[in-house]
């Protein structure tokens, strides 16, 4: 198999694009896809400071790598979830990456902000770990960005992540979640920063290949709590569809964005208030993060 | 396991309803679901003559069985697709059922109307058999109903069929097909009869159990052309989701009907014309059936 661009031996076949690339032309292709994402959705400009949420995994470090090389003003944000060795290892990867590229990294411990690390939150809530963890991450990404004056947070969500989330929302027709499924969520309140996903055009296999070719030292292990998560079942199903018909994930996600998403956008927006406790945005009076934090504190006292 | 209604030994567990029934209470439940479907979507009244499209399979014969016992004025329509032994066997089942219940059955041969049976249409078009077959069935159901003065055609599509069709439409976001996905399609033109699916609330397993308990002699074999059909892949995927989370299919279909379908309905309808050849409804000048029929005739002459 030969690279479709230069004719050299190919290292990667991209069936859904019916093409193949050598290492150099693949990394070019990868960066082009990121550029196209940023351009198409006006994610951010070179004048803006971008907070890149990094987990230590292949996706977020690949994203950071591209953004640095593209000349963006980036700062990493590592949220320490306190998930045993997994967090120790993933934090080390982020620190090593930031040091080697000489870029700043902010580290925020969930335990400091919420009152307990993710494993304890899971026990207190008696719900899957992903529930309290996702809530904490979304909250802290936004708060840290605001506190440090970043107008935008970039996350490493790839095509597989986005397609799997969409799949879950569609199976239950979560009409609240569907309009929020987008590569770029604008700021709808002075206390909400923009959220963007510059890797949404690139598959998990492609981000892994890019990270490998760029010799990025990332954590290969999945979060120990991810096992059995619904999103993994959905990813498996989408992988099966992709095997039978290459491009299935892409068509599913892009078809939604192009043809269906608008149908779910509400005429009137949701009313947004500021949490009476922490001042962050909430649809109620006290935000979900503060409520969960209270629950954690009560449980520690009890 | 005991029947939730009478406490007798249960013959069938319905996980998605978290219940179990004895034979008698299950057939009651089954008929109630059909009644509820007819009532909720005002499918037809006891004054109307209903044309029931029957294939000889479990679903359509179970449907006919219920409608007869509910006192509806029904006539069966068997479309002979000319698919080798499969058609011979399935026709015999419909004739035997009609004779035993003393109800009228209309038999129409696709070969007479289209100029060739389904296997030959497949060869001429070089497309999957389901393509020309589906087109012929939809066309002939409507035409036969009109010619005999039936205001409505009922088909045996069950929950699994409907969920699989929806799944296929959603994977590609076929925004033309999505608003047409409904248990009851009204007549939008004097030459289009109403189409209704009174079994849409009942799963394939339930229609099979009903047919078995009612001792209906139906054809168990699938159509030989169905093998490898995309709809079967989609059914398998939905079955997997159902295993993991009972009610998944139901929630997917009913969630769409309740919360999402309206979002896809167009403000303006499609313009409908009468085919200059056969007078049936088409969005163009000559309808797809007449075009395909021409292609078949040309191929026979060529």
Image (tube, coloured by chain):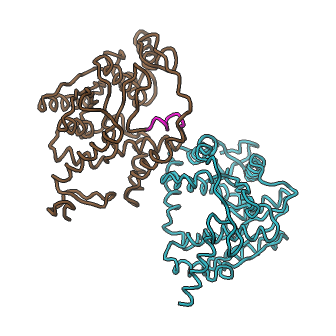
Chain colours: A brown, B cyan
Q: Which residues are magenta?
A: A174-181
Q: Quadrant of the C terminus of chain A?
A: top left
Q: Nearer the viewer, residue A21 or A193?
A: A193
Q: Nearer the viewer, residue A28 or A213?
A: A28
Q: Would you say B135 lies left or right of A40 here? A: right
The answer to whether any part of residue B239 appears in the image is no
Q: Nearer the viewer, residue A136 or A23?
A: A23
Q: Would you say A254 lies left or right of A94 here? A: right
Residue A117: image x %, image y %?
33, 21
Q: Quadrant of the N terminus of chain A?
A: bottom left
Q: Quadrant of residue A3?
A: bottom left
The answer to whether any part of residue B84 appears in the image is yes
Whether the magenta-drawn stretch holds residue A51 is answered as no
Q: Is residue A105 above or below residue A219?
A: above
Residue A211: image x %, image y %?
20, 43
Residue A22: image x %, image y %?
17, 57
């Amino acid at each position: 198999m030969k690279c479709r661009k230069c004719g050299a031996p190919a290292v990667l076949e991209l069936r859904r694009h019916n093409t193949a690339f050598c290492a150099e032309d693949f990394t070019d292709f990868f960066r082009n896809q990121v550029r196209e994402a940023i351009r198409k959705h006006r994610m951010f400009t070179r004048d803006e400071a971008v907070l890149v949420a990094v987990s230590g995994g292949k996706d977020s470090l690949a994203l950071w790598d591209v953004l640095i090389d593209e000349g963006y003003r980036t700062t990493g944000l590592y949220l320490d979830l306190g998930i045993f060795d997994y967090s120790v290892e993933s934090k080390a990867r982020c620190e090593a990456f930031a040091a080697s590229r000489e870029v700043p990294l902010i580290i925020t411990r969930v335990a400091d902000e919420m009152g307990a690390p993710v494993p304890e939150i899971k026990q207190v809530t008696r719900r899957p770990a992903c529930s309290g963890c996702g809530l904490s991450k979304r909250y802290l990404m936004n708060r840290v960005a605001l506190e440090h004056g970043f107008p935008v947070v970039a996350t490493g969500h790839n095509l597989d992540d986005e397609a799997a989330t969409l799949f879950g929302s569609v199976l239950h027709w979560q009409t609240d979640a569907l309009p929020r499924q987008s590569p770029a969520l604008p700021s709808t309140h002075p206390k909400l920063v923009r959220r963007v996903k510059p890797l949404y055009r690139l598959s998990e296999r492609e981000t892994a290949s890019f990270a490998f070719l760029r010799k990025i030292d990332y954590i290969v292990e999945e979060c120990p709590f991810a096992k059995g998560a619904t999103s993994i079942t959905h990813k498996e199903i989408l992988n099966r569809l992709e095997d039978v018909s290459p491009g299935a994930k892409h068509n599913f996600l892009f078809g939604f964005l192009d043809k269906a998403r608008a149908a779910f956008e509400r005429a009137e927006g949701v009313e947004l208030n500021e949490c009476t406790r922490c001042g962050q945005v909430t649809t109620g009076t006290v935000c979900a993060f503060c409520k969960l934090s209270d629950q954690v504190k009560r449980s520690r006292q009890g």
